[in-house]
Image (tube, grey):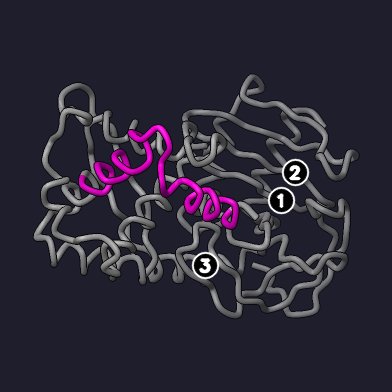
Amino acid sequence: MGFKEVKRELVAALLEDRYRCVARAAIDTKNLLHAGEIEAEDVALIVMACRGTDHRSFPHHSAQDIDVHVLVTAGWYIKFFFVESRASLISVHRTGMP
Amino acid sequence: MKIFHEGHVERAVCDADGLVTVTFRYRNVPFADGSGVVRDLLVGVCDVCNEVILSPPQSAPAISAARKRATRPVEANLPASYVDALDAAASRVDVQANTEFRKRLLMFYLHRYARGDEAILELVALAEPSLDLPTTGPRRRLSFKLSERASEKLDYVLKKTGLSTTQLLKALIGKIALDVVKPAKPSRLAELVALCDVMNA
């Protein structure tokens, strides 16, 4: 999946509530979307402003057939992958955080 | 928004088990920073390991409301030497310690003062500038969120000492520097390493 398609799919998933926040037995408070400190629509706006150079991807460590995508743009770090038509967001936070 | 109900099944990726099916169930789910728990939250539970691995959009308002209830932001603009001392102590306990461990260290000492394990009034002297912690030079922001219980302890110590939050943070870091950073063999290190190990388990 190329960058433009990844971006389009993520924006649509965020706006249509086809997204999940990834949890590891707890609510990830560093994931601002998961902690309820940012709205999905706001994340979609950040993603819309992304360019191809902001994007990289690599296989998921526990499901090699699934690509994990990272967008680093305008002070934001967004990490996610797709399962079927849903976006699973691992990280949504300001850059500079660990 | 499509509303899901308990028992809904879909595919997801589990960190431990790879591509799996999850079943939506109501669970009490803690915040990862220890600031509280969201009760009866609809989440996706891995059908293989039974761990909570996702939450759907409809659970966001409950998380947000619980987060606001459970947390109190604490912020201070401190001389860089104080934040450096705190980071030095954290890395002495665990070289891989992240900024979250700053809060744990501060809370460990706050708890000791609140419980009376340390003489609470020594904090007033510790809040004063010292040779080890110069107040000149750049400043850095320290911010974290406290649970309701930690917040009560903070209020108790603030009231007893008459210090401001910034002064109290300086005093706690002063104590941490004396206890953990300065000594060649810190006496409390084993206790803190054990605490860190439990947190990372």
* Subunit ID for the residue under disc 2: A
Q: Is residue A87 magenta?
A: no
Q: What's the residue at 21%, 69% (across, down)?
A: B156
Q: Is B123 located above or below residue B112 in the figure? A: above
The image shows residue B180, relative to residue A41, as above or below, that is: above
Q: Is residue A72 left or right of residue B52?
A: left
Disc 3 marks which amino acid? Ile
| Span highlighted in magenta in the image | B171-199
Locate residue B102, reporting x and y percent.
41, 45
Q: Which residue position is annotated with label 1?
A: A88
The amino acid type, in three-letter code, at marker 2 is Phe
> Which of marks 2 and 1 precedes in the sequence?
2
Q: Which residue is mark 2?
A: A81
Give the SS element for disc 3.
helix
The 10 Å Cα crowd at callout 1, few under 14, some 14 to 19, many 20 or more, is many
Which residue is labeled 3 in the image? B63
Q: Taking the image as drawn, is residue B100 in sight?
A: yes
